[in-house]
Amino acid sequence: MCSKRLKAALPLWLPFHEQEHGALEEPVRQKLLQISAATIDRLLKEKWARYRGNGLCGTRPGGLPKHQISICTDNDDVDRPGFLEADTVAHCGNSLAGDFIWSSTAFGCFVSSSGVARVVG
């Protein structure tokens, strides 16, 4: 979560945290609610640097050579139905181990419609 969203989430999240872990001292609570996004970035810079990356990848090289699969990088020349863009996403948190959901999205380039399928993996 970026610092701007974290700052916006703090007033919503703090009551649940206090319910679970006990009330914070009032000066600490006020400082948390008044903290700026830039200060959050500065304080958490080292922590976030450890966990940032390119994300997880659940794909593996396929069996077909790449030259057998035609890939179009733009849709300017699509003039009839039958072309689509597709993507898969693993909704797994920070680990590909265990059970999680894959979603597959396909978008029809000519007809401008899309669909989503979910697969338990």
Image (cartoon, rainbow, N blue to C red):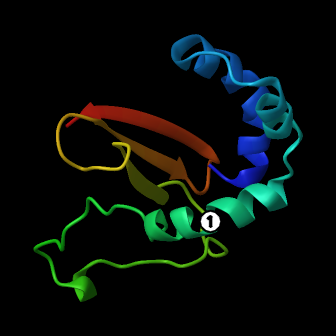
What kind of element bears circle 1?
Answer: loop
**Position in image of residue 5 (x %, y %):** 74, 44
Q: Camera-side residue: 51 or 65?
A: 51
**Position in image of residue 2 (x %, y %):** 68, 53
Q: Residue at x 60, y 22 (%)?
A: 17
Count of numbered circles in the view: 1
Callout 1 environment at 10 Å: few (<14), some (14 to 19), or many (20+)?
few
- Residue 93's image quarter? top left
Q: Residue at x 19, y 68 (%)?
A: 60
Judge from the rendering whether residue 31 lies leftward or rightward of residue 96; answer left or right.
Answer: right
Would you place residue 54 above or below residue 106 in this image? Answer: below
Residue type at tag 1: Asp
**Position in image of residue 41 (x %, y %):** 72, 62
- Residue 69's image quarter? bottom left
Q: Camera-side residue: 29 or 68?
A: 29
Would you place residue 86 above or below residue 7 in this image? Answer: below
Residue labelled with disc 1: 79
Judge from the rendering whether residue 113 lies leftward or rightward of residue 94; answer left or right.
Answer: right
Point out the residue furthest to the bottom here. Answer: 67
Judge from the rendering whether residue 47 lies leftward or rightward of residue 117; answer left or right.
Answer: right
Quarter occupied by the C terminus = top left
Q: Camera-side residue: 58 or 37?
A: 37
**Position in image of residue 59 (x %, y %):** 25, 63
Point out the residue furthest to the top here. Answer: 19
Would you place residue 31 above or below residue 59 in this image? Answer: above
Q: Residue at x 36, y 79 (%)?
A: 70
Would you place residue 77 above or below residue 107 in this image? Answer: below
Q: Residue at x 60, y 42 (%)?
A: 113
Q: Camera-side residue: 70 or 62?
A: 62
